[in-house]
Image: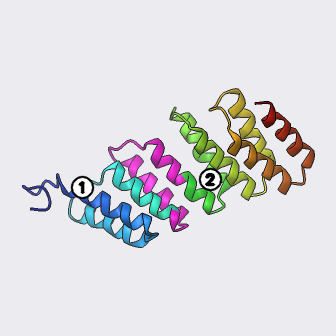
Amino acid sequence: SWRGGGGGGGGAVPAFAAAISACGRAAQWDAALALLEGMRADRLDPSVVSYNAAISACEKGHRWWQALDLLRHVENSNLLPTIVTYSAVMGALHKGSQWQRSVALLDLMRDKQVSLEVVSCSTVISACEKGHRWEAALALLTWMRCEGPRPNVISFNAAMSACEKGREWTRSIHLLRELQAL
């Protein structure tokens, strides 16, 4: 059977994950969520890969609240969220202009000792920039320089853009000089 024989779902879970991923690439978040729900209805346990694909679909569909809901499902199951899980949720929050939730998620990741990547931190800086929160963007960049993953040109550009939006042009120039010195 297509389920991998015996009804245990051995082959079905990866097949569903692939289909959910395809829906995500096509920006069909609603179809991706329907497939995930179909897995549950068929008594199949979605894998973290299935959830990641659905969260990515929500990100592409600008459905940040559904991405957060899926993260809660992962956390309440026997699955461990991965950096991919968190990064997809972070991207959805950024696209949804949810800078406060982005910062809170980053704090949660730090509390859970998730190995942070520069991309996730830069996404939060960008979310702060989008929310016109230059102070929060600079605080995160400072944290990255002292304790977090080493900031890159994207991190600095996002922070400079946040300063620009906050009419803090002298801080932006200072960050540019700092970036050039790296």
Packing grade of label 2 (10 A; few <14, some 14-19, many >=20) is some
Residue behind mark 2: 101
The kind of residue on which mark 2 rests is Arg
Q: Which residues are magenta?
A: 60-89
Packing grade of label 1 (10 A; few <14, some 14-19, many >=20) is many
Please say whether residue 76 is one of the residues in the magenta stretch: yes
| Mark drawn on residue 13 | 1
Quadrant for the C terminus, please. Answer: top right
Quarter of the image for residue 14 reads: bottom left
Quarter of the image for residue 139 reads: top right
Between 114 and 28, the residue placed more toward the observer is 28
| Mark drawn on residue 146 | none
Between 100 and 92, the residue placed more toward the observer is 92
Q: Residue at x 24, y 55 (%)?
A: 13
Quarter of the image for residue 120 reads: top right
Q: Is residue 159 above or below residue 33?
A: above
Q: Is residue 61 above or below residue 72?
A: below
